[in-house]
Amino acid sequence: MSSVATVPEGTVNPYALSHLDSLESEAVHIFREVAGEFERPVILFSGGKDSILMLHLALKAFAPAPVPFTLLHVDTGHNFPEVLDYRDRTVEKHGLRLHVASVQEYIDAGKLRERPDGTRNPLQTVPLTEAIQQHRFDAVFGGGRRDEEKARAKERVFSLRDEFSQWDPRRQRPELWQLYNGRHAPGEHVRVFPISNWTELDVWQYIEREGIELPEIYFAHEREVFSRSGMWLTAGDWGGPKDHEKVETRQVRYRTVGDMSCTGAVDSDATTLDAVITEIAASRLTERGATRADDKMSEAAMEDRKREGYF
Amino acid sequence: MTTTTEQLSDTTLLRFATAGSVDDGKSTLVGRLLHDSKSVLTDQLEAVALASSNRGQEAPDLALLTDGLRAEREQGITIDVAYRYFATPRRRFILADTPGHVQYTRNMVTGASTAELAVVLVDARNGVVEQTRRHAAVAALLRVPHVVLAVNKMDLVDYAEPVFAAIAEEFTAYAASLGVPEITAIPISALAGDNVVEPSAHMDWYGGPTVLEHLETVPVSHDLTECHARFPVQYVIRPQTAEHRDYRGYAGQIAAGVFRVGESVSVLPSGRTTTIEGIDALGESVDAAWAPQSVTIRLADDIDVSRGDLIAPVGDAPAVTQDVEATVCHVADRPLAVGQRVLLKHTTRTVKAIVKDIPSRLTLDDLSQHPAPGQLVANDIGRVVVRTAEPLALDAYADSRRTGSFLLIDPADGTTLSAGMAGASFGAVTEADADSAAQDAEWDF
């Protein structure tokens, strides 16, 4: 097959890449830079669409060789069963190695205390940063995108973290051309965001183009949910609903996949990728605005969590 | 439904940067572009409205949309470059939103390094001022292919054509003399919305595009057949599995030009030659590939190639050198001094280096040069001579932004010190189109 023949017709410049090809090429370049410069990189993998996308890009970047990275999942203990199932199948299919850092184990060992609101998302930071130290990971890939949130819009592609995993937005290195500077001292590490420049819509369009399989909860389905702070949360044994919260069955889907206690579903009848893309293109709400309770805690919630070492 | 999806996928991507000083209306322009292209979503506007009223402001402050950090919101200033994303049915955009205050040079250099277009804002009441010339000079220095002059606040000069025409003429002459290849001047009012997204009802005399129309239609890449083909090797792929026992591929992102199967190539710095046996474009075997595609190249001969090497066509390879003469923008708070030991990162190769000389420092305000400053401090732009411990296959920045650029890094803690551009500073200035020989000499610092 000749690639010259695959240039979209009607393009003025035959060498112009489509926006998805540009983003793909950039992300692959970032994966390969890390493989070339770091000793012990790891990909954060939750089974959510952004980490699935990252794994797909990594597979393409090193084909026909295997992905030269291991995976790390910070398990909040409140995961969607479909997502854990997807995670395990994926790991097995590609012959990857998965590390799991468990919030539940930290709670059981008395090293973390459950929050009054039952939300475990902020509790991920300690298991995450300790896993990084314990395994001496020097580059940690995350699926964060700058379009997600205003603090993330300030994040670099290569983001240096100190020995406490802290992010200091005032001390970021300028990022010039495609020359990523990954130098770091022992104990420090670099968070790497290969899909920084992707938007939610780009992610979905690429998933469609590449025929990437996703956990079913991203598509409309009947689910038992209850309303809390204006969001539909899944009823389950994680601590919801409370007595006054009424469970009902609705047709919903998820735009993001996180901890069950703070990730909301949206009403939807989008059962196919096409329908999802059409729905997102028309949505007047951002992904996080629609479905993440943890970002609503304060104006700078994400920045504060990131400073502590969260993604 | 399918149509929508396909239309959205077929668009191209334009990376651009904005430059403007604090009062030129840059935030208003960015806000207007985002707002009028319907890229600000309801929950973001609600968050801004809530935050504004919490502070006792009557109207939503759109700057809160772009100032993402606690410190920025507290102080009402923009600290750092932020990247924003918006789309129209015709194109996707990545906007490097660079703050216009004190640390302008390094911020604009950061934003402009990946931009294919820069928007320079001018207040119609003030015309071309020092800051405008500084922005034009940085755009020229970074060789941003397209520059838009947005003459803002036209509503405050009665939408008068002569005001716009005079500013456009002065700016175009100045920028062209610096070597900016393409300049488009647009009269706008970001506040009133004239010629940003919607054509103005107040300026019938203007027949050109709105800012958004221009952003949607400007070509996104150069004619690559004109460029010297360059492929920095990033990573060697050797699966060593039963299925791919003999596979040995050189992974990288094509920095410039086109590579074709069957082509004779040199591998630098060793200078060994071979031919391209195959090109794998992320899983698909192709006959040709071009910048900025990430591909894997397979070579006919089993020669020693590793990360940091550069593949280029035989007969069109860059010279290999250990003496780098370049213009640098110093981006760190600690200075860069003659005699300093640094690391130099060029494409995929990082080598030890020493700063042999700093022949001059440029004052962007008037483009005057100060000889032998001894050191460069934050935001300085200067000429440097660097000796590297190993040979580099280095192009002039004028020929390739990708293979002519480099970083200077502090070996002690990894701090990025300077952004470097190899070769002469300002391009395309010929005897014929320079205003005077004297000016020409001044820029050749």
Image: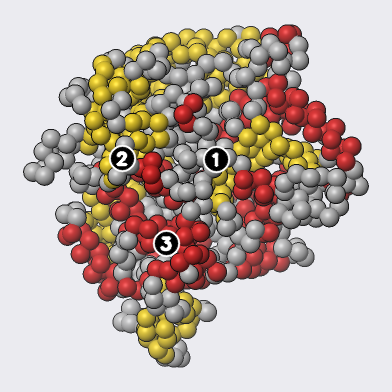
Q: Is residue B394 above or below residue A219?
A: above
Query: Can residue A300 be spotted in the picture?
Result: yes
How much space separates mark 1 and mark 2, taking CA atoms?
23 Å
Checking the image for residue B385, the label placed there is none
Callout in the foreground (1, 2): 2
Q: Position of residue B2 (x, y in %)?
A: 45, 66
Q: Is residue A182 above or below residue A257?
A: above
Q: Circle 1 sits on which residue?
A: B220
Q: Amino acid at mark 3?
A: Trp
Give whichever of B311, A246 is nearer the camera: B311
Q: Is residue A309 above or below residue A83?
A: above
Asked if labels 2 and 3 touch by Cβ distance under 8 angstroms, the answer is no
Chain of the residue that carries numbered disc 2 in the rendered image: B
Reading the chain from its start, which is encountered first: label 1 or label 2?
A: 1
Q: Position of residue A258 (x, y in %)?
A: 38, 67
Q: Amino acid at mark 1?
A: Val
Q: Circle 3 sits on which residue?
A: A204
Identified at 43% across, 10% down, the residue is: B323
Q: Quadrant of residue B364?
A: top right
**Residue neighbourhood size for the residue with mark 2, other residues' Cα within 10 Å, grouped as few (<14), some (14–19), many (≥20):** some
Give SS at disc 3. Answer: helix
Identified at 50% across, 13% down, the residue is: B325
Of the 4 image quadrants, the one containing the C terminus of chain B is top right
Q: Circle 2 sits on which residue?
A: B286
Query: Can residue B417 be spotted in the picture?
Result: no
Residue B279 falls left or right of residue A194: left
Chain of the residue that carries numbered disc 3 in the rendered image: A
